[in-house]
Amino acid sequence: MMSDMTQTSQPPLPVAPGWRIDEHARAAAIAEHDIESLRDDAALRRITDFAAALCEVPVGLVSIVEAERQTFLSRTGLDLTETPREMSFCAYAMREDDIMVIPDATQDPRFADNPLVIDGLGIRFYAGVPLVRDDGIPLGSLCVIDTVPRAGLTALQRQGLKVLAEDVLRRLGDSRSAAASRAAIGDSEGRFRTLADTMPQMVWSTQPDGFHDYYNARWYEFTGVPAGSTDGEGWAGMFHPDDQDRAWAVWQHSLATGEPYQIEYRLRRHDGQYRWTLGRALPIFDDTGAIVRWFGTCTDIHEAKLASEEREVVAQELSHRIKNIFAVISGLIGFSARANPGFATVADDLRARVIALGRAHDFVRPHSAQSRPVADQTSLQGLLAELFEPYQSRTASRITISGDDVAIDDRSATPIALLFHELATNATKYGALYNDDGAILVHSRRVGDRIVIEWRERGGPMVQAPAKTGFGSQLIELSAVRQLAGTVAQRWERSGLEVEITLPESSLSRN
């Protein structure tokens, strides 16, 4: 839920050209409605819930704009019950002849400095339908809000919001009579069914305990089953036998926890073909936090699923060929070393670096379920464990990895592999891995938006700083500083080499 915020003054709202509604008449019109009795009205709440779901935004509101404030009769995804009028987007929307859409409020001079934009709520996208009575008096707006910019609304979303706004006006107009209120609720539900039947997705709804009691026309058109035959638990029989237990378990988890329901499964179409479908559902809560309804959709994703599987096969084949290229290069280096014995030492170092790059590539490349590494492929510690595996002893761990794990990707895996392979190789030649008693601790920790990785060698022969910078040191500098935009500090202590590598976390993963 969006939280409350400090109220600050805004410049008076300008009067739109041609808009000349008497504020006294408008105040009298608002007074005709029992505003307090309509706060958190169940019918209005269903409207704002559905408006937010229809437009795929976190917030839906019914706002009545009064002389000095705007009051939210119904609110979905927001804790505020009112704001000063000078902060109101709806005060502008209610003057329009059509839906007012603000793709990015920070770019709109009317709202860029609005506290609802720059402070707590962080409004970016806004769309509001004017709530105007039959006598031409504007009352406020039915609006939807998002905290990220959006391009606008689809034609279906615009149509849906207008239908829902009509229901809001009907609810406001009928609030003076209990009988009229019941009629408005029934009409609202009828309009909801009409709107749901026009949606391309299969729409369904359940009671709080998960009992399915509504499907739209698209469901029956897709499945071909008789109306009502999938009520209750009958829906589960529409899934592929191999998916039924999994889908049921996920649904039961959502019912027990209130967490959103999302799953991919194969749904039987009317011609008997099972097609991949994305199932989603969200709970609707009352003011006490209890679930009063579940609304869900089923979307046919069969072609997209097959295309994704084909892309994965191609990616795996490409990665396999790249892996083979590393092996070929390593073989060519070995062949050249045999033909040129004087090149052997350099060739061994070069081949080891190529092998390290190959191990890094193999760790982050696309994998099948059978070939995927045990460690998370986005794990820094998982990659380091893979790189250090050839240096570990069968009886004890020579290199210990600890601390905070962080996310990496294919872009950062290569310089990381070169950097730590070089450190491990030097430790084998001159440092803690030179004898059987030495050990290395690699510890990573977050410091703000940076990652600090410490390399500490202990138990090896005494080492001293080299007289001149060699290729290995240059390679470490190239990997950490130039490619990962970090820093490297080396300390040649009597107990062993200590290296502190500081990297921006953003350079390790695109996310």
Image: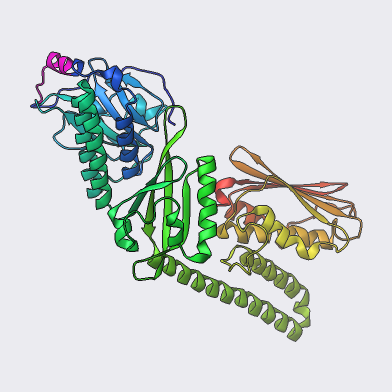
Residue 20: within the magenta? yes
Number of callouts: 0
Determine whether 476 is above or below 183 in the image. below
The residue at 46%/27% (across/down) is 288
Q: Position of residue 347 (x, y in %)?
A: 73, 75
Range drawn in magenta:
19-29
The residue at 88%/61% (across/down) is 395
Residue 50: within the magenta? no
Please tell me in which quadrant of the rendered image residue 173 appears. top left
Q: Position of residue 164 (x, y in %)?
A: 24, 38
Q: Nearer the viewer, residue 439 or 261?
A: 261
Main secondary structure found in the magenta portion? helix
- In the shown orientation, is residue 98 left or right of residue 11? left
Q: Position of residue 441 (x, y in %)?
A: 79, 50
Question: What coloring was used for the rendering?
Answer: rainbow
- In the shown orientation, is residue 175 left or right of residue 125? left
Residue 10 visible in the snapshot: no
- In the shown orientation, is residue 95 left or right of residue 428? left
Direction bottom: furthest residue = 339
Q: Position of residue 77 (x, y in %)?
A: 40, 33
- In the shown orientation, is residue 408 left or right of residue 476? left
Determine whether 174 is above or below 418 in the image. above
Q: Nearer the viewer, residue 388 or 190?
A: 190
Determine whether 497 is above or below 171 in the image. below
Q: Nearer the viewer, residue 459 or 233?
A: 233
